[in-house]
Image: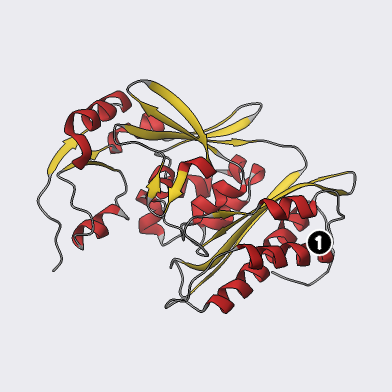
């Protein structure tokens, strides 16, 4: 049986208390909420923190989904099952429900959190792709106050984020824009597995053309990948299959997959192409545009 190395346990009573504990306990302290990423790493001795700071009691403080006139604000301790069940969130950003349906299993979704998913910074992680697609920003709080960073700034590399040792992610903010919809497509080896490749897409239409579009890929590079070239290529174009084909070609060229047990480089580039087209196509259909009846999923 694989067991973690010995560690000390603390239970935070507030966000300020958690930040204070991080500052006092130093570099060997880690926060834990759902624990579905950290605990397996501890059992394999890939992570050996001396202290675990349990933040589950902070759910009342950080487990929320709030709408303002300009954005949706989601607390870092909002659980996957809460994201999946929230109807206003689905209406504004259907990509969340698309992604949550294919994340792990009910046990993980009942305990795992948005903040835990983003802070793990796994290049194959679904919600990192979702937040990249939606141009989200992350609120990081420390002893000296709060700062807000973009998703591009938040993820610095595999398993590395902009959150410093004495800080914690407290909130994710997603801008609300009129005339838009979104979708998520994923290929996995078995239900609930990490992605072989996944693609999120967000699309905004105005006057019959694409006003803006964003695509975020997962599992095809060192980081969750946003592709500005797709946005540039689609702006001002009609929402047609030709546009989705061009976006898929750019996605395949822009990503940097590696051959591993989930597939070859060539196969993953093919999936990046195909899933980008499908996600854009589904986003368009949610806006009442069906360029090719019966195509895609």
Q: In terms of image quadrants, where is residue 246?
A: bottom right
Q: Left or right: where does residue 91 sit relative to residue 78?
A: right
Q: Single out the residue that lies furthest toward the right.
A: 207
- Above or below, comparing residue 33 to residue 46 in the picture: above
Q: Which quarter of the rendering shows the C terminus?
A: bottom right
What crowding class fits label 1: few (fewer than 14 Cα within 10 Å), some (14-19), or many (20 or more)? some
Residue 192: where, in percent of width, then height?
A: 44, 66
**Residue at x 83%, y 69% (from the top left corner):** 293
**Residue at x 24%, y 32% (from the top left corner):** 22
Q: Is residue 277 visible?
A: no
Please give the residue where the numbered disc 1 appears in the rendered image: 243
Q: Left or right: where does residue 236 sit relative to residue 284?
A: right
Frontmost residue, 13 versus 229: 229
- Above or below, comparing residue 186 to residue 9 in the picture: below
Residue 56: where, in percent of width, then height?
A: 29, 38
Q: In terms of image quadrants, where is residue 39?
A: bottom left
Residue 113: where, in percent of width, then height?
A: 40, 46
**Residue at x 26%, y 60% (from the top left corner):** 40
**Residue at x 77%, y 72% (from the top left corner):** 295
Kindly state the secondary structure of the residue where label 1 is placed.
Answer: helix
Q: Is residue 245 visible?
A: yes
Residue 255: where, in percent of width, then height?
A: 59, 63
Frontmost residue, 68 versus 229: 229
Q: Left or right: where does residue 183 sit relative to residue 21?
A: right
Q: Which quarter of the rendering shows the N terminus?
A: bottom left
Frontmost residue, 255 versus 241: 255
- Above or below, comparing residue 286 to residue 263 in the picture: above
């Amino acid at each position: 049986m694989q067991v973690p190395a010995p560690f000390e346990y603390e239970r935070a009573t507030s966000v300020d208390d958690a930040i204070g504990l991080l500052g006092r306990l130093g570099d060997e302290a880690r926060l834990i909420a759902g624990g579905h990423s950290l605990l397996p790493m501890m059992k394999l001795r890939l992570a050996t923190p001396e202290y675990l700071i349990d933040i589950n009691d902070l759910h009342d403080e950080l487990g929320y989904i709030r709408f303002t006139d300009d954005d949706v604000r989601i607390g870092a301790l909002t659980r996957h099952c809460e994201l999946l069940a929230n109807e206003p969130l689905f209406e504004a950003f259907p990509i969340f429900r698309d992604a949550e349906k294919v994340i792990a299993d009910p046990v993980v979704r009942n305990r795992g959190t948005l903040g835990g998913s983003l802070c793990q910074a796994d290049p194959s992680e679904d919600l990192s792709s979702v937040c990249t697609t939606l141009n989200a920003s992350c609120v990081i709080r420390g002893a000296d106050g709060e700062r807000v960073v973009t998703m591009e700034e938040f993820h610095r590399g595999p398993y590395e984020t902009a959150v410093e040792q004495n800080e914690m992610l407290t909130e994710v903010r997603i801008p609300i824009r009129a005339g838009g919809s979104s979708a998520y497509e994923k290929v996995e080896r078995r239900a609930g597995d990490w992605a072989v490749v996944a693609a999120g897409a967000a699309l905004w239409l105005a006057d019959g053309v694409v006003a803006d579009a964003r695509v975020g890929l997962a599992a095809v590079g060192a980081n969750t990948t946003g592709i500005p070239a797709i946005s540039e290529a689609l702006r001002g174009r009609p929402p047609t299959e030709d546009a989705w084909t061009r976006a898929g070609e750019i996605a395949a060229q822009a990503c940097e997959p590696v051959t591993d047990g989930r597939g070859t480089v060539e196969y993953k580039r093919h999936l990046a192409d195909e899933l980008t087209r499908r996600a854009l196509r589904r986003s368009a259909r949610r806006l009442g545009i069906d360029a090719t009846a019966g195509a895609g999923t």
